[in-house]
Image (cartoon, rainbow, N blue to C red):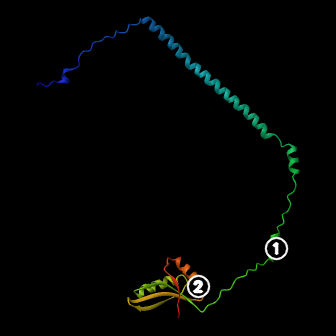
Amino acid sequence: MAQKDYVSRGRTPQKNNKKAPAKKPQGKRQAKTKADTSNNASLPWMRLVVVMALLIGFVIFLWSIKDSAEQKVDSPVTSDVIKNKDDLPELPEEEWEYIKSLPGYEVEVDVAEQEKSDKRYLMQCASFRTRSQAEEMKATIAFQGLESQIRPSTGANGEWFRVILGPFDTKRDAERAKHTLRKVNIATCQIWFWNL
């Protein structure tokens, strides 16, 4: 089978069923062109006249506004306005009673005294395997203004070093110290009853 070369073959001729447009006579075309150019020449002059008329009208409008604005600014204040200002009553002086009554005022509050018990509170914050870790925790607690102790204890698991605070007379004092230590991220403290 032979291959066909479609590119070199070119296009097939097409039949043209359309009729060619009729040619117009040259005389009419030239006459129409002369009329168009005369209209085009008068059009820029018309535009220029309209723009100038609008510009002059705008300037006149601005001039009329300027005169009316100057009249409003220059007009003196009428005497009616001044009379209305004088008709207002004078402001009374305010008297505050609490200024006089506060210096001699005392508040009495009944505070129930806490019952003192024989029990004392101690707070254990940590328990470490090495003494150096316990000393480090003791230093952190000392920076908060609290005094702690390191107590060694020996048990079934070996030797431990406990960091304790106290003794505190009331549980409220122990809670206050516990909240102080929470500010520096020491949240492992526990309050217990201990006998010294």
Neighbour tally class for label 2: few under 14, some 14-19, many 20 plus, Cα within 10 Å: some
Name the residue that disc number 1 marks: 101
Which residue is nearer to you in this view: 195 or 92? 195
Disc 1 marks a residue whose amino acid type is Ser
Farthest left residue in view: 1
Which residue: 51% across, 83% down?
Answer: 190
Does 143 appear above or below 95? below
Which is nearer the eye, 152 or 25? 152
Name the N-terminal-most of marks 2 and 1: 1
Q: In this view, does 1 lie above or below 171?
A: above
- Percent across and percent down for residue 67 are 75, 34
> What secondary structure is marked by label 1?
helix
Q: Quadrant of residue 27?
A: top left
Say the numbered circle drawn on residue 171: 2
State the image quarter where residue 16 is shown.
top left
Indicate the amino acid at tag 2: Lys
Mark 2 lies on a secondary structure that is helix
